Image (cartoon, rainbow, N blue to C red):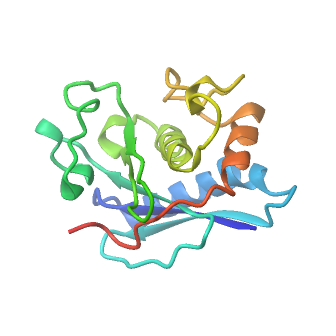
Amino acid sequence: MNFTLWVFELCGITDVKRLEIANLLNTQFLTPLVGGGISSARARVVAGDATITPGRFDAVVFLTNIGFQGSGSIMKRVGERPEEAIGNENVKGLTIKGSGATAGVAEAYWNRCELLTHVCATIFHEAGHLKFKGKGSMHDQPGVYVLASHTRNGSTPNDADIKVFKAAIPHVVALRTRVPA
C-alpha cells in the first residue's frame, strides 16, 4: 500500500519553503510509517492551481492563511464555516469530514504556525482527522502527542502518533483533486 500526503499550498510561500515543508514531512512524519503493509509514504506539496490524481489511500490537506471571519478558509468554498478557528488564534488547522462520495476539507493555517515543524505537525494532524476511523476520537488515543487536541504545536510525532496514523491509512475517503472554486 502506498500513501501520499498531498498539500495544496495557497498562502503564497516560496518554492524553497514548499520544498522544506515536503522534506520535513517526508523525513520526520512519513518515513516512520513505512513497513508492515505500507510500501511508501511521501508528501507532495503542490501549487493551488494544480490538479492531482490521489491514490486510493492518500490524504489531501490545504495549507492556507485564515483571516477575519474565516477569510482564506477553503471550508467557506464548500458552504461550511470554520467556526472553531474564527476568533481562536490557538486553532492551527481544522477538518470537516466528508461522507460517502463527498470529500471533506482538511486545512492547516500557515499564519498561525510559528515554525515549520508546527506547520508540518498541523498538516499531519489534519490529515489524521480525514483518515481516522476508530473507537473514540483520534485525540484520545493512548499516548498520542501530535494527534492530540492540546498539542497542536508538537514538533514531531511519537510512536503512538505513528501507530494511530499508520492504522488509519487503509481507511479510504473521498478526496479533492483540486482546490474548490
Q: Residue furthest front?
A: 100
Residue at point 49% right, 29% down?
Answer: 152
Residue 151 drawn above or below residue 79? above
Viewer-side residue, 41 vs 116: 41
Instruction: Quadrant for the C terminus, please.
Output: bottom left
Give residue 69's quadrant in the image: top left
User: In screen coordinates, is 71 left or right of 25?
Assistant: left
User: In screen coordinates, is 72 left or right of 149?
Assistant: left
Viewer-side residue, 64 vs 13: 64
Residue 131 drawn above or below residue 141? below
Residue at point 30% right, 75% down?
Answer: 49
Q: Residue furthest right?
A: 36
Q: Report x, y in % for residue 137.
A: 56, 29
Q: Report x, y in % for residue 48.
A: 32, 69
Residue 73 drawn above or below residue 103? above
User: In screen coordinates, is 3 left or right of 160?
Assistant: left
Q: Residue furthest left?
A: 68
Residue at point 38% right, 35% down?
Answer: 92
Q: Report x, y in % for residue 120.
A: 52, 46
Instruction: Quadrant for the N terminus, please.
Output: bottom right
Give residue 40's quadrant in the image: bottom right
Residue at point 26% right, 66% down?
Answer: 180
Q: Report x, y in % for residue 165.
A: 67, 44
Q: How many marks?
A: 0
